[in-house]
Image: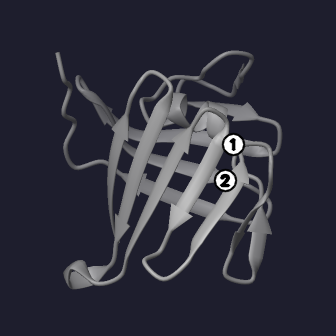
Amino acid sequence: MSVAWVQGAQRSEITLTGPLGLKSVQIVVDKGQITIDDGSDVSRYTTEMALQVGKDKFHLPWASIAYWVRGLRGPGLEAIGKSGYESGPWRVHILRSDSMGPQLIEFEHEEVQLRLKIRKWQFEE
């Protein structure tokens, strides 16, 4: 799966695309609202609600995720060593980084473990 993430000051736009460009999901986070469009159904949540993904339901701390993907702890997060931090039930580990930012990040929760590999950073001026 590939992830294209555009992060603005208050808005996130995330596109998840399956192998060979099949099955695309668009996620927009703006002003406390999350909209998930999978092409056949649109779901709306507040950033405080638990998301339903398939049969699984879990809470993603959207206010913190915009910091995490850039390798930043964000406000109110507790450090767990040089390359990790935690927020509530979430533990975030920067497994690999370079001068541009994180290259491999692991997100751990008791219900789910995710790894995000960043291939390219692009900064707008």
Q: Nearer the viewer, residue 6 or 88?
A: 6
Q: Position of residue 42 (x, y in %)?
A: 57, 70
Which residue bears the numbered disc 1? 91
Q: Label 2 is placed on what type of residue? A: Glu
Q: Is residue 100 left or right of residue 67?
A: left
- Look at 74% across and 55% down and name the residue there: 109
Q: Are the residues flagged by discs 1 and 2 in contact, CB closer than 8 Å?
A: yes
**Quadrant housing residue 125:** top left
Q: Going from the N terminus, do you reach mark 1 or mark 2 first?
A: 1
Q: Quadrant of the N terminus?
A: bottom left
For the point 71% across and 43% down, which residue is it? Answer: 47
x then y, percent, for residue 55: 74, 83
Q: Which residue is mark 2?
A: 108
User: Circle 2 — which element?
Assistant: strand
Closer to us: 78 or 8: 8
Q: Residue at x 65, y 44 (%)?
A: 33
Q: Is residue 3 above or below residue 19?
A: above
